[in-house]
Every structure is written in structure tokens, then in C-alpha cells.
Image (cartoon, rainbow, N blue to C red):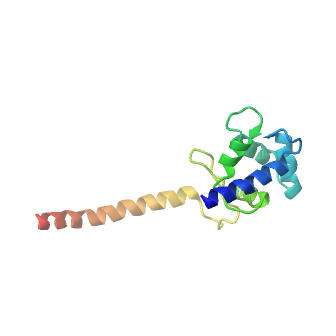
């Protein structure tokens, strides 16, 4: 309960800071201005993607509830850290995965997935006969 109240206060303050026209909603322009204030190198496609993810009602504006839902569990003390969390690696199931830029060179997620699958198949093939023998011995 304490976490919820603290997080709500922090997010409400950030939301009110971004909401320059004080109408209770964030527009794409307000979000873009706030992000460019922190990081001038962010491209408009990233900002558009972020805005579309927050705008769950698809009405072209972000209510406080949409903002709260999007940022509630993302760690960080400031908007800058929260935005960095989004840009550098957060994703929802079903989204395109944003791979952090500091990932080691030469590591391909598909290769990692394939290697994990092969390792799992080999380990189950090697241990299945022992598990069957153990069950027979118990009976």
C-alpha cells in the first residue's frame, strides 16, 4: 500500500509537469516536447511508438489512468529514467522486442533460442530413461 501511494504521487507529479496546458490529458506534442527536453537525439518514430503504447483508448490523448497503467511498474525516479527503461529494453508480450544496445556483439536471439531448444531436447533424451527406470524400481 505504501509503494502504491508513493508511486502514484511520483507519477502524478510527472504527469502534471508534462501536461503544459493543464487539461488533464497529454497530447503527442506535449510528450514529444518533454522527451526532447531530456534527450534531443530521440527520433520521432520512437516517440510515436511510445505514445501509441500509452494511448490504449486510441483517442489521440493520454489520460492520467493510461499514463499510470503504462509506467506504474517501471522502476526509476524520474521521467528520464522511465523513458530510458522504455527505449532500452522494455517490451510487452506480443510486441516487437527492443534489444538493448549494450548487448554483446554476435549474439543473435534466434541462435540463443535454438541453442536452448537443442540443449533441452538433449537433456530430456538423456534423463528420460533414468526417470523411467526410477519409476519401475519404485513400483
In which quadrant of the rendered image does the N terminus lie? Answer: bottom right
Q: Give x and y (percent) for residue 97.
A: 62, 51
How many labels sit on residues? 0
- Residue displayed at 82% across by 49% down: 16
Q: In this view of the protein, which residue sits in the foreground, 35 or 45? A: 35
- Residue displayed at 85% across by 44% down: 30
Q: Is residue 13 above or below residue 119?
A: above
Decide if residue 111 is on the left or right side of residue 102: left
Q: Give x and y (percent) for residue 132.
A: 19, 62
Q: Give x and y (percent) for residue 103.
A: 66, 65
In which quadrant of the rendered image does the C terminus lie? Answer: bottom left
- Residue displayed at 69% across by 59% down: 6
Residue found at the far top of this picture: 59
Based on the displayed image, in which of its 4 quarters is residue 86 positioned? bottom right
Q: Is residue 8 above or below residue 21?
A: below
Decide if residue 118 is on the left or right side of residue 104: left
Based on the displayed image, in which of its 4 quarters is residue 108 positioned? bottom right
Q: In this view of the protein, which residue sits in the foreground, 71 or 100? A: 71
Based on the displayed image, in which of its 4 quarters is residue 137 positioned? bottom left
Q: Give x and y (percent) for residue 45.
A: 78, 45
- Residue displayed at 88% across by 55% down: 37
Residue found at the far left of this picture: 139
Decide if residue 4 is on the left or right side of residue 126: right
Whether residue 13 is visible, yes or no, is yes
Whether residue 89 is visible, yes or no, is no
Amino acid at each position: 500500500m505504501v509503494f502504491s501511494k508513493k508511486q502514484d504521487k511520483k507519477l502524478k507529479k510527472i504527469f502534471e509537469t508534462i501536461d503544459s496546458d493543464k487539461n488533464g490529458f497529454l497530447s503527442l506534442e506535449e510528450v514529444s516536447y518533454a522527451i526532447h527536453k531530456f534527450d534531443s537525439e530521440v527520433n520521432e518514430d520512437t516517440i510515436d511508438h511510445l505514445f501509441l503504447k500509452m494511448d490504449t483508448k486510441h483517442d489521440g490523448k493520454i489520460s492520467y489512468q493510461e499514463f499510470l497503467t503504462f509506467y506504474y511498474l517501471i522502476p526509476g525516479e524520474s521521467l528520464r529514467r522511465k523513458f530510458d527503461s522504455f527505449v532500452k529494453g522494455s517490451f510487452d508480450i506480443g510486441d516487437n522486442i527492443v534489444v538493448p544496445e549494450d548487448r554483446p556483439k554476435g549474439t543473435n536471439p534466434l541462435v540463443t533460442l535454438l541453442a536452448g531448444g537443442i540443449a533441452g531436447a538433449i537433456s530430456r533424451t538423456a534423463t528420460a530413461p533414468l526417470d523411467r527406470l526410477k519409476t519401475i524400481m519404485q513400483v
